[in-house]
Amino acid sequence: MDRGRQVAAGLVLLVAGSCLASGVIQDVPLSAAQAGMGEVSLLAGGPLAGWCNPALLADQSGPRVVEAGGAELLGSGEGYGVIGASWRVSDRVTVGAAAASLGASVGELDADANPTGNTLSHGTLSGGFLGAVAPLRWLECGLALKGYRDDLEGVRAQGCTADAGLKLSRLDGAWWGGVAMRNLPVASGGQYGSGPASTPPVEARAGFGCDVPSLRVRVGVEVVQVRHRDSRTGVGAEWRPWGPLAVRLGMIDVEVSPRQLTMGLSFAIHGFDFAYALATHPLGVSNRVGLSYAFGNPNPPDRAP
């Protein structure tokens, strides 16, 4: 790869890496609902929240849920699409699957950093299966097995990783906490070609959430530590002024400047939930949309102690 293409490839990775650090990412397919709440996974549920912590797969709105969404970071050539589904097999066991596709592109530069008119691209595909078990009413455990493929201008890295997570809850649902380890290496399919194609970095998550029924508000905080990167913190809140309507606010990287603000709305009707989220970003503004559909009784059965 000559110098010009190295410069352009570096810009592609800068865009993708910056998005990875802030949520418009190559491996975590966030739902629009979660994105609007400072990306706090413990305030979400279902197949896409389970991609952040597989134990959250059990916190879904119906026995069967299908969820899809997309995002675009304006001005960066970055965007992704995501789809997930989950099924509550019994009052203790939930299984699901999710997949995501990310693409980023940037204009090619020559050796003097002048535009050539060509475009370089970076794409990532990931997908896998998730499972959650609730052995006790206050404990949920989850596992996920995922495959990935990362392509950058003909250079490919691929392999398989695993996630593990726990969620602990007070029996009355007043508060809950969770921890997860993500992208634990399982198998590597090798790298084809020489270049900066990458594998998903190991990641640790820990968070806490609580419910304030008198105000119709839920709030949460989550710390994410990605290997070889600075940690980041997200805080978020969801307010339901009216049953079908949810208003969401959040902040990411609250310990650094500039802080990234998030906000979102969703509306639910007849099992469908339409969601939108907006987030500020050093590279621009990201917009996310999402749609989920819950089949059957929206109230999960009580779990035996």
Image (tube, grey):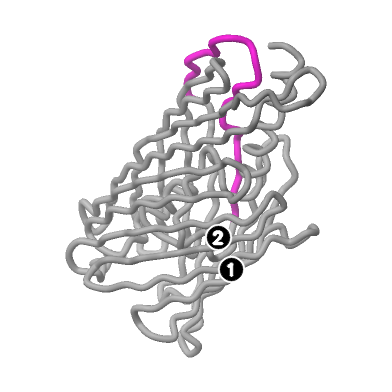
The residue furthest front is 117
Near-viewer residue (135 or 186): 186
Q: In which quarter of the image is residue 106?
A: top right
Near-viewer residue (138 or 275): 275
Quadrant including the N terminus? top right
Look at the numbered disc 2 and give the secondary structure of its residue: loop
Look at the numbered disc 1 and give the secondary structure of its residue: strand
Identify the residue position indicated by label 1 in the image.
236
Assess whether residue 303 is covered by the magenta stretch: no
Q: Position of residue 13 (x, y in %)?
A: 66, 31
Residue type, numbered disc 2: Val
Residues at marks 2 and 1 touching, judged by CB atoms closer than 8 Å: yes
Q: In this view, does 270 lie to the left or right of 84?
A: left
Residue at image coords 34%, 47%: 84
Residue at image coords 56%, 35%: 104
Residue type, numbered disc 1: Gly
Residue at image coords 53%, 57%: 287
Q: Residues within 10 Å of mark 1 (few under 14, many from 20)?
A: many
Q: In this view, does 141 lie to the left or right of 221?
A: left
Kindly identify which numbered label has been placed on residue 295.
Answer: none
Tell me if residue 79 comes above or below residue 189 in the rendering: below
Q: Give the range drawn in magenta.
A: 186-206
Q: Position of residue 127 (x, y in %)?
A: 39, 35
Residue at image coords 50%, 31%: 124
Q: Quadrant of residue 221?
A: bottom right
Tell me if residue 111 comes above or below residue 45 in the rendering: above
Kindly identify which numbered label has been placed on residue 40.
Answer: 2
